[in-house]
Amino acid sequence: MAGASSAEFVTYERKGDVALVGLNRPQKRNAISDRFVEEIGLAVAKAQSEAKAAVLFGHGDHFCAGLDLAEHVKKSPIEGVHGSRRWHGVFSGIEHGTIPWISALHGAVVGGGFELAASTHIRVADETAFFALPEGQRGIFVGGGGSVRIARLVGVARMTDLMLTGRVASAEEAERWNIVQYVAPKGTALDKAMALAQTAAGNAEISNYAIINALPRIQDMAKEDGLFVESFIASFTATSPEAEERLNAFLEKRAPRLKAPGSA
């Protein structure tokens, strides 16, 4: 274990090229306060300064039950705006940062916790995970980027249903709805996320950067604009020294070939 440290609400450690960032307020179901957001931001910056991939997980019985309502209810409207924008900044640091982030989800992935998970690039849920957006029942609205990130994952109609009705989705439904990419047995999401992060950490850094930063932006472009940008990124990455070495390793049969699922 390298670089292990702990703040009040966030734990941090590094295992090889992978940073592990743990939400650590289990007595509050990891509900996110303003201070919590700042600690997440510091951990994100540290991970991106020294790791090649990162895993985000929750200590205790839940990943994150969302916004700390006790703190939020005391805010003025402008304080609420400033708080929301800070969430946007920190979560964008994950989504549009320099390394891939994989989240390991269990128990409640609700409200702001759902929004935080949506800012990661790959999401692994164990069988205990459940997903909800109860803001409509609380008299509020999503403020951590959910109207953009979650709506893009599940579609506006599905998100509208979640917010209007308080519907709770299981891990299996989350996989069908494109919220998560993997469902793991109870208690194994972190192990799966760690394995995926180690794989991603082994990629060329320029390829990882292009994947996590170019793909979502290309989706915002008109078709021909996206194809034009893709050509430049493809050419730029393919002519890097690391790409040359990796391509030659493949051509010279020094790199492993892909295998069909289930094959020996």
Image: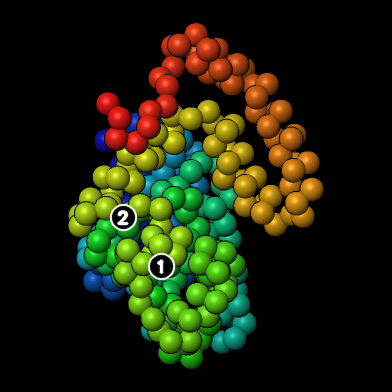
> Residue at the location (32% across, 42% down)?
194
Observer able to see residue 99: yes
Is 20 placed above or below 150 here? above
Left or right of residue 95: residue 259: left
Label 1 with label 2: CB-CB less than 8 Å: no
Closer to the chain start, of discs 1 and 2, is 1
> Where does label 2 land, which residue?
183
Q: Quadrant of residue 54?
A: top left
> Which disc number belongs to residue 25?
none
The residue lying furthest to the top in this view is 252
Spot occupied by residue 16 in the image (x, y as percentages of width and height): 34, 31
> Residue at the location (39% across, 75% down)?
132
Tell me the CA gap for discs 1 and 2: 18 Å
Q: Quadrant of residue 221?
A: bottom right
> Residue at the location (42% across, 22% down)?
257
Circle 1 or circle 2, nearest the eye: 2
Looking at the image, which is closer to me, 234 or 90?
Answer: 234
Observer able to see residue 67: no
Type of amino acid under label 1: Gly
Q: How many marks?
A: 2
> Where does label 1 land, which residue?
113
Spot occupied by residue 170 in the image (x, y as percentages of width and height): 32, 69
